[in-house]
Amino acid sequence: MNIFQEFSALIEELFRIWPGSVGYKLRWLYYRRRLKYLGNNVRISPGVRLIGHKHISIGDDTDINFGCMIISGLVGQDEAEFHRVSNPAFQGSEGEVLIGKGVHIAPGVYILGHGGVQVGDCSGLAGGTRVLSMTNHYASFLDWYRRDMYFSSRAGREHACYIIGPVVLGRNVGIASNCVILPGAQLCDESFLAIASVAHQGVIAANMIASGNPAVPIKERFLPLPNKLGRTISSIEP
């Protein structure tokens, strides 16, 4: 890190912790210039840490609360082993974090966006949630007999194996406290992940509540409304 980068980091740290209404305005002005996109009326609370500015987009009227961390950007693929999982629903590029309009991200949420993360409009992530588009795997996918694969990031990249793949949350998705969402997971529109659940690679269908580890659908979130002819309407308009 050169002297200019150190100075920029110092300025950002000052804006990051500034309290009150002045702090919210300063953070908006600062990140408006640094992020790939920052919408209007976005509230970034003190203590939020954003890493990889040019890969982060945040829509209008979104709140990111105290102590959240969002990490984005491409990861260097040198000597480590990478196991990729696909997610056709992802609309961005690898390393991007795309947060929609009217999203609420509660205190202590951690989003790791190296594989790509997309959060739809009006979704909510409760405190302690972990959205992980890249994870350190416990063994090699290429050679399960290898004993020199370590879980510690300090053991050398040649001894690491990672799973990487986009995570997609649709519109009006609810994530309860302390959930974990793993690479390749997709939660479709109006779905809900129950408290402390783990969403593995795969799809949770629209309007379903999922629970457990691995999370599985247990019931519909919204019941269909009857129309005037006595039939039911399969989805609820906002």
Image (spheres, grey):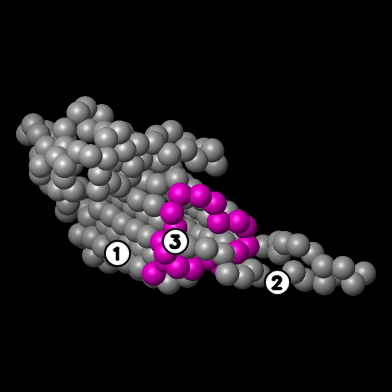
User: For the residues marked 1 and 2, what is the alpha-carbon distance in whole angstroms?
Assistant: 32 Å
Q: Earlier in the sequence, mark 1 or mark 2?
A: 1
Instruction: Report the Cα–Cα distance between label 1 and label 3.
Output: 22 Å
Residue farthest to the front, as pictured: 145
Q: Mark 3 or mark 2, which has the lower sequence index?
A: 3
**CB atoms of marks 3 and 2 within 8 Å:** no
Q: Position of residue 182 (x, y in %)?
A: 39, 52
- Quarter holding residue 200: bottom left
Instruction: Check if residue 60 falls in the magenta segment.
Output: no
Look at the numbered disc 1 and give the secondary structure of its residue: loop
Residue at the image position 90 percent from the left and 72 percent from the top = 230
- Disc 3 marks a residue whose amino acid type is Pro
Is 197 contained in the magenta span?
A: yes
Q: Is residue 115 left or right of residue 69?
A: right
Left or right placement of residue 59 versus residue 148 in this view: right
- Where residue 205 appears, x then y in whole percent? 60, 56
Picture layout, residue 31 above or below residue 191: above
From the image, which quarter does the N terminus lie in? top left
Q: CA distance from mark 3 to mark 2?
A: 24 Å
Image disc number at residue 206: none
Residue for badge 3: 214
**In the displayed structure, would residue 139 be above or below residue 229?**
above
The disc labelled 1 sits on which kind of residue? Answer: Gly
Q: Earlier in the sequence, mark 1 or mark 3?
A: 1
**Kind of residue at disc 2:** Leu
Residue position marked by numbered label 2 in the rendering: 223
Q: Residues within 10 Å of mark 2 (few under 14, many from 20)?
A: few
